[in-house]
Every structure is written in structure tokens, then in C-alpha cells.
Amino acid sequence: MKIDSLKCVGCADCLPICPQLAIKIRNRKAAIDEKCSDCGACLRVCQNDAICAEYIPPEQYVQCEACPIRCKIKEGFLGACQRYQNRDGALERTIKLKKLSDVKNVVGEDWRKEIRRPLITAIGAGTTYPDCKPAPHIIQNKVHGIDVVTVVTEAPLSYSGVKIKVDTDRMLGEEGSPISYHRKKVGHLTTEEYGSKMLSLGGVNLLTGPDGLFVAKVVADVANRKKIRLKIGNGAVLDLQVGGPPIINGEKDYLMRVGCGSATLGLFAEMLKKVADEVIILDSHLTGLMSEHAAGVYVGTAPSGVKLKFPRSTPGRYFGDHGSGWGGTSIVNPQEVIESVDSKIAKPGMLILITETTGRQAAMFQLTSTGSLKEIAITVKAKEAVQTIAETCENSRVSAIYCGGSGGSARAGVTKYPIRLTYAVHTNKAKLTVGGAPTFVLPGGGINFMVDVEKVMPGAFSWTPTPATICPIEYTMTLDDYIKMGGHQEAVKPFIKGD
């Protein structure tokens, strides 16, 4: 990289974004030292176009091929990801391959096998209220010769909600948009995950707000796998049911994308090379252009001269936009994604295949002798390739995770010393389950947990007009640990077959 001192204003935006800390401010101007690997991060954030790429003679570096950035790493220095170092002209991983024994202390111990499953579930158990009395059922039994206790209660939780995962590449709305149920706000559209859109419903602020009853009902309905209809502000209308395909604006979605446009090229480059001179995979996150892409270069695809309208991330990978068109982009007519074709590189008769990451739609174009593109019928081989992409996709479906916080007063139904229960949960002395299903307990303070609702019996969740949702919670531990935490020994009952 090279800095134009006349354009540089010393704003220092490039400093914190430089992975190698190769940029310094000297005399109110940016300067780049020898640690630079030409990763281009500083170039992207410079608002004054003061940074440009500069050619470095090949003998001065080793080019890394571990990712699309392709850092040029000089002797003794690191690449942008800090994983590879140039040592004596060869790239070496900075951390050696680790055995499980090397990380055992970091990973921590698993739960004892005796407490991994509850003796009974809390479904139908009833609720500990007021919280100063023992939980409704505290059951003891021997498991693998060890005395084990399970404490169960159906806990009303104001700190609760659901995260809904919708497998689709279709545009649902802008991140942060409110989500309404019967015209009442019940959540918001949150971050997109790989091939999916995420909806966050509930939470204490909405549950205790003016529309809390609607919030409690919709959270319980989702957790119980009932059908619901949601409206995203300035976005889509969704008909959802956990376990089934999403219906978006009245249209059922069937396929979850195989990967982003770049990943799709990486998976199928060898096959796609045989069906067209150039292949474009439209995707709202990363649209792929085969001739530039590392996978295309690897299989021997020749440069095509095609330039896309989207901004380029790295060679062959372009940041798409969001819309109701192909691949969740704004492109309705696939040819519109092509900004230009360089006649000095492209040849008349060249075939261009454009499709999506789901293979839902596809079109083929041919370059004419005048340099224009003419749409033609998709060849048999191209159809087979697109069909292969579609067949590699998973079914589009709706799933959900119930999230709750049980670190409050409900702990008193388990023990006379509530903080000891919290410690026991975080040190794997007590196993928290929901309706018999395993949970993930979030690190840090409190007992915040998540559970896959498809592992819990439908109807196990409910809600109350306090408002709150009601969740069946089990704590399982050895009898010795239960006694040590100050458990309600007087309420312990023996396990009876049929419980």
C-alpha cells in the first residue's frame, strides 16, 4: 500500500482497522511501514482516497492462499488474520495443531453422567408460588448407584422470549424493524445468519409494556409450535409454524440456500466451468463471479471481461444488496447485474449463466458480435447444473429457541441459598433442563438459558396475564450437592415407578 500525503488529512480512521498495526501517524500524516501485507483494509476505510495499492517485487514476499485476501507476507511478518507468518520464505501457522488434552482446562468438565437427564420433567408439575416454599416436586432416586435429586417447577418468567430462525434468502425487511402481532409490537427483526433471517420476540421490556399480554401469548404460541401471523414494519407478512416451511407474503418458501454466492461457486466450480464461459451467482450478501473467483481460477476458467454493478469485496466476490429480486437482491432482470463487458477480453459467442444460490431461477445469455448480450434458452447441461445446486439445498423451515432467565426468586423453591444454585449450574454440578430437553446456559452471571422448542413437548409452555410466559424447568444434581447447597431436604420424596 502507498499513501498520497497530499490527500491524507491524518484522520487516523485507518489505524484501528489495520490488522498488522503497520500504519502510524507522523507529522499529521499516515505512513505505512514494512509490516504491511497489502490486505487492503485501510484502503476500504479511507474517506479521501489517499491510499492506493502499490506493486511489490515477488521476491520480497510469500503470497498466502488461505483466504480471498491473499496477503503478501514479508519475511518475519504476519498476514492480516495473524494466523500465518513468513519464516525463511515459507508460511507457517502461528499456533500449532492442538490435541483435546491441550484445551481440556479451557473447555471444562462435562456433567456427571448420573445427572445428565432429569428423573422427571416439570411438565404438569405446577408452580412454586409464593417462592418462599419448596418446589412442587423434589424427587430422589439412584442413578448408576449414585443418589440423585431432580427439582421441578413450572416457572413464570418475565425475562423470556423466543428467537425464530426463518430459512430463506428472501427479503423480509430492514434489520431492527419492529414486528407486530395483531397490530401490537412484539419484537424486532434482528441479524441475518447463514441462509436464515432471525426474529426476536418478547423480552422483559415488551412483556412489561402496554402490549405485554400480546407478547406473552405470541411467545408461548411459538414455543408450543402453533401457527402465527406476523407483520414486519415496512416489510413482509409472515405465516410461521415451527417445523414447517415459512410462508412469506402468501408464498411458501421451499429451499434454503446452499451457501452464499461465493460458497456456491466454491462448491460447484468444476461443474459450472463445463456449462458456460462465465457464471454469476446472485446473492444479497456475496454475489459470485466465476472467472475472477479463486475457485474459478483454480479450475482454469479464463477471464471473461464481465464487470458487475455491485461493489467488489475480493476477486470474484461482490457485496450484493437487498430487495425482492433474484437471490434476495434488487435484481429483477438478471442481466441488470452486469455493468459492462470488456470487448478486449470477451469473445463473441461467450455464454453467461446467471442463477441464484437456491437454483430457483436461472437465465443464460450469449455475447453477440456487436458486443451486446442476447438471452438464449438454457442449455441442457446448464439446466442440470442449476438442478444440482437446487438439490444440494436443504428444505426451508422455521425453527425457534426459547430464551429465559431463571436466576431470580424461583431459585428459592430449590434451595435456601439461591446463589449456590447459580454456582452449581455454572460449574456443571447441577444440570438445567426444560421439559426434559437439554439447554445452553449463557456464561456470565445469572441463569440465562436457551432451549430448542422442537425438543420440548408441544403445550408444555403457557402464559399468564401478569404477564409472563411459563416454562417447565428441572434442576438435576447429586443428593450430596443438593444438601451442600442448602436444598429443601424435608421436601424430598422417593422416585416412584410411574412418576
Image: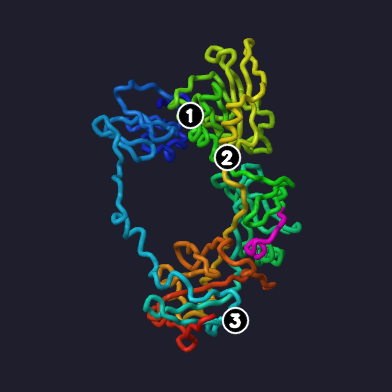
Under circle 1, the secondary element is helix
Mark 1 or 3: the one toward you: 1
Going by the numbered disc 3, the residue's amino acid type is Tyr
Nearest to N terminus: mark 3 or mark 2:
3
Q: Which portion, as a residue range, is magenta?
A: 220-230
| Colour treatment of the image | rainbow
| Residue closest to the far top | 369
Label 2 to label 1: alpha-carbon separation: 17 Å
Label 3, residues with CA under 10 Å away: few <14, some 14-19, many ≥20: some
Label 3 to label 2: alpha-carbon separation: 53 Å
Residue highlighted by disc 1: 270
Per the rendering, the mark at residue 391 is 2
- Name which residue lies at 58% across and 41% down: 257
Q: Is residue 175 above or below residue 451?
A: above
Going by the numbered disc 1, the residue's amino acid type is Glu
Q: Is residue 4 above or below residue 242?
A: above
Label 1, residues with CA under 10 Å away: few <14, some 14-19, many ≥20: some
Label 2, residues with CA under 10 Å away: few <14, some 14-19, many ≥20: some
Q: How many marks?
A: 3
Q: State yes or no: discs 2 and 1 in contact (Cβ < 8 Å).
A: no
